[in-house]
Image (tube, rainbow, N blue to C red):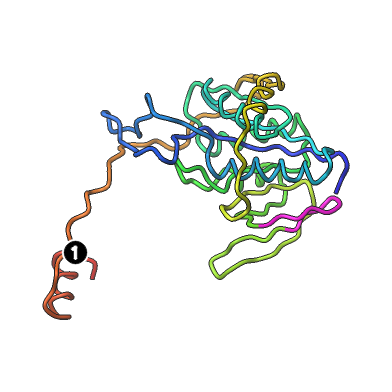
Amino acid sequence: MSSNLRILVACKRVVDYAVKIRVNAAGTAVETANVKHSMNPFDEIGTEQAIQIKEKSGGKVEVIAVSCGSDKSQETLRTALAMGADRAIFVESAEELQPLAVAKLLKAVVEKEKPDMVILGKQAIDDDSNQTGQMLAGLLNWPQATFASKVELAEKAMTVTREVDGGVETIKTPLPAILTTDLRLNVPRYASLPNIMKAKKKPLTKLTIADLAVDVKPRLETLKVTEPPKRQGGKLVESVDDLVDKLKNEAKVL
């Protein structure tokens, strides 16, 4: 492993996974006002992985957490710093950022920081897009290893076990590279109170969209958001023919 490895970790602020999601009154998005937010769980796993790499290196790795969004995203970065990240970068945006915009912003940060690896969660639990890591790899023309369940680093390379439909696949790629994390990679640590206090003194750099000169104009427009229909009660059927008839004429799935 390189003695001067630098890892950039993306951390997104999302509605907490334990919150029951409700559509807002306008029907344009989910309700976020007065709702608990936290770091995207897959990004927590990515942050934990970066910190584990740092610990195994004897502290020779620098971990930089980065988040793009509203001013409150700084709370998410402080969580990453409390977990063990060395410093943080906050890119402020008053408008909602779509995956392509985030990928462009991360590319600009990468060009400034020159990391050896960028770690992202495989997807965010609010939009479930699963796009940002792949888009970033494409914009940077870097190799990528997605859905990682195991990561091993060697000199200027990483070996990744990743989950695929038929089981698992092991690939090796040179650095710099993009890594996206899956659930089975690790279990994120809880930040201790002393580390939470120390995190307040760690450096957090603030940037704006203008500083990075990136076009974040939305490419997609949400026309309407509706809640799924309530689940109906089950029915007992008398025979296979009765079941087929209901599937065909009532459920209309045949």
Q: Which residue is drawn at 68% across and 46% down?
A: 49
| 121, 248: nearer the viewer | 121
Quarter of the rendering occupied by the C terminus:
bottom left
> Which quarter of the figure has residue 79?
top right
| 140, 68: nearer the viewer | 68
- Number of labels in the image equals 1
Q: Tag 1: Cα neighbours inside 10 Å, few (<14), some, or many (≥20)?
A: few
Q: In the image, residue 93 lies at what x, y percent?
A: 54, 23
* Residue 8, placed above or below residue 228: above
Q: Is residue 101 left or right of residue 141?
A: left
Q: Which residue is drawn at 51% across and 31% down?
A: 97
User: What amino acid is found at the position of numbered circle 1 in the picture?
Assistant: Ala
The residue that label 1 is drawn on is: 251
Q: Which residue is drawn at 65% across and 22% down?
A: 197
Highlighted range, magenta: 150-159
Q: In the image, residue 141 lies at what x, y percent?
A: 71, 46
Outermost residue, bottom direction?
Answer: 240
* Residue 110, placed above or below residue 125: above
Q: In the image, residue 237 lies at what x, y percent?
A: 13, 73
Q: Which residue is drawn at 17% across and 70% down?
A: 248
Question: Which SS class for mark 1?
Answer: loop
Outermost residue, right direction?
Answer: 3
Magenta residue check for 152: yes
* Residue 208, placed above or below residue 184: above
Q: Identify the main secondary structure in magenta.
A: strand
Magenta residue check for 197: no
Q: In the image, residue 213 lies at what x, y percent?
A: 64, 24
